[in-house]
Amino acid sequence: MCSVCGCGDGETRVDGAEVRKEAPGRDHGQGHGQAHGGHQPHPHHHGRAHDHAHGHDHVHMPDGTVIHYGQGPAGVSVAGLDQPTLVRVERDILGKNDAIAARNRAHFARHGWLVLNLLSSPGSGKTTLLVKTLEALGASVPTAVIEGDQETTADADRIRATGVPALQINTGKGCHLDAGMVADATATLHPPHGATVFIENVGNLVCPAGFDLGEALRVVVASVTEGEDKPLKYPQIFAKADLVLVNKVDLLPHLDVDVEALVDNARKVNPGVAVIRLSARTGAGMEAWLRWIEAGRILKCAAE
Amino acid sequence: MHEMALSRELAALIEAEAAKHRAARVTRVVLEIGVLSHVDGGAMAFCFDACTRDTVAEGAALTIEQPPGQAWCLDCGDTVAIGKRGDSCPCCHGHRLMVTGGEDLRLKEMELV
């Protein structure tokens, strides 16, 4: 119990009722922190609402706890010379994005959408791959595409030319899509129930890695022209992938790249990752890719 | 640079926490950036100064703690320390590692006045 004002543990009781004795305007600034002893904010029950003046300087928390500025090393509180208080926060900096991503995921599930997040460096052939994929899927399954680029609607225009609805997100100077952008995009695009929705992220092997969009599956497209070392140079993006699509394999005869080393490197940062080698241009490997998407849809439906 | 977007989120978190504790100023911020996270501490520090300008945390000292990387080796059946993604197991030198620690990105503590 505080020996000065009587607050804290062991409150005085008369006939089982708490007795409060603190007088208005009582000056008990010095020594208050020491009298309380501990360093944790604690309930500070005053009998009445705060219509009294506090001689000591402390902050009352909305939830009934108190931070005492007088609990610092010196144990005193002097107006204008308050001591700092250390508070533990322990909050994820990406918490807001992750919360929106979780809402997205639930929303996508309600609509039966299979949402794939496609990530890669610029120029890996994502848009060509998407165009060929959409053409191959045809009318067998409803599809929609969300395109992410800093500028231009070029990619969405290419997708729309296939007859598939597409929405372009221009991030301006932004280097990645975030969950809020995708929430806005799906609200605008509103694909039909059961659609497969492809999100083509901003071409960037670094920044999009940390931003959950609420997708069901993450696909990293790595073209063979980029060399075999990219999974080790940009491990974050490969580490979170469900599938690595090794694109442009039709160019292999013209390159010195070691495609087996590329696959080994991807599995050094993500041991269980699935790998499909394909050429969007020639169609080699496209069937495996389409089967993988179908498997994702079946698993998703089974889970629901 | 995604650190700028993250710093803006961080500045908003700090403002909210400071308001909750009715603090006039934030004098120190402690971040936890795991060595296997996707964030560069130096870039984060640079962006932090820019994003906290004209806020309660302007001029606050920034401390970045970097918890080490940790993984579960599927072959050894044990937890091992790794310095970066793609590292092999220090015991069996295999690569069948599942990262279990050192990925966090957290606002840990704040010093309030």
Image: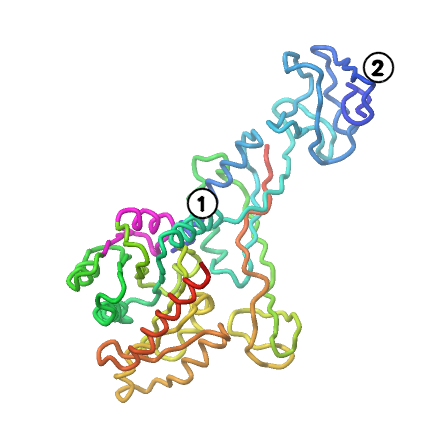
When the figure is inspected, residue A136 is found, relative to residue A203, above or below; the finding is below
**In this orientation, which residue lies closer to the viewer: B21 or B49?**
B21
The disc numbered 2 marks a residue on which chain? A
Q: What residue type is labelled 1?
A: Glu
Q: Which of the chains bears the disc numbered 1?
A: B
Part of the protein shown in magenta: A166-188
Q: Which mark is residue A136?
A: none
Measure how far apart labels 1 and 2 are at the Cα level.
Answer: 51 Å
Mark 2 = which residue? Answer: A14
| Residue assigned mark 1 | B9
Q: Tag 2, which secondary structure?
A: strand
Horizontal side of residue B28 vs A229, given as left or right: right
Residue A174, percent across and down?
32, 52
Mark 1 and 2 residues: CB-CB less than 8 Å, in contact? Answer: no
Q: Nearer the viewer, residue A273 or A226?
A: A273
Position of A34 relative to A195 (above/below): above
Q: Position of residue B27 (x, y in %)?
A: 56, 38
